Amino acid sequence: MKVYVSYKKLWKILIDRDMNKKNLREMTGISTASIAKLTKGENINTDILVKVCHALDCNIGDIMDILPPDNGIESATD
């Protein structure tokens, strides 16, 4: 089963806070590979999402959406 996720909310938060991906990486200590997965809308370890939420003082629903499978966006979970 494919999982469809969107991290558009995360990128909006970063823009609103005048931050970039490098700032997020430095705040959380997550790898550039994890940032790349977020950028591509791929599945990512829950621990990474929790680190992002703690760094940005938000909840998981504030940074991501789970989308219906018929929207044409795919993740790497074949």
Image (cartoon, helix red, strand yellow):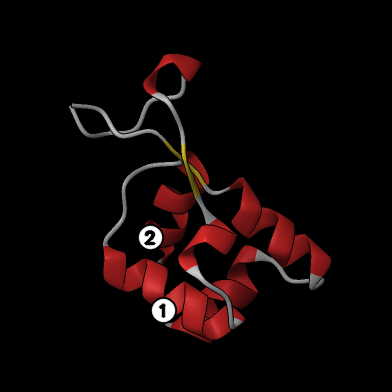
Q: Position of residue 36 (x, y in %)?
A: 45, 51
Q: Secondary structure at mark 2?
A: helix
Q: Secondary structure at mark 1?
A: helix
Q: Is residue 8 left or right of residue 68?
A: right
Q: Identify the residue position indicated by label 2 in the image.
A: 34
Q: Position of residue 46 (x, y in %)?
A: 29, 65
**Residue type indicated by callout 1:** Lys
Residue in the foreground of this view, choosing between 41 and 61? 61
Q: Position of residue 47 (x, y in %)?
A: 29, 72
Between disc 1 and disc 2, the foreground one is: 1
Q: Identify the residue position indicated by label 1 in the image.
A: 51
At 43% from the left and 26% from the top, the residue drawn is: 68
- Say above or below: 19 vs 57: above
At 69% from the left and 66% from the top, the residue drawn is: 20
Residue 30 appears in view = no
At 74% from the left and 71% from the top, the residue drawn is: 19
Q: Position of residue 33 (x, y in %)?
A: 37, 58
Q: Residue 15: which disc?
A: none
**Residue type indicated by callout 2:** Ser
Q: Is residue 35 left or right of residue 18?
A: left
Residue 19 appears in view = yes
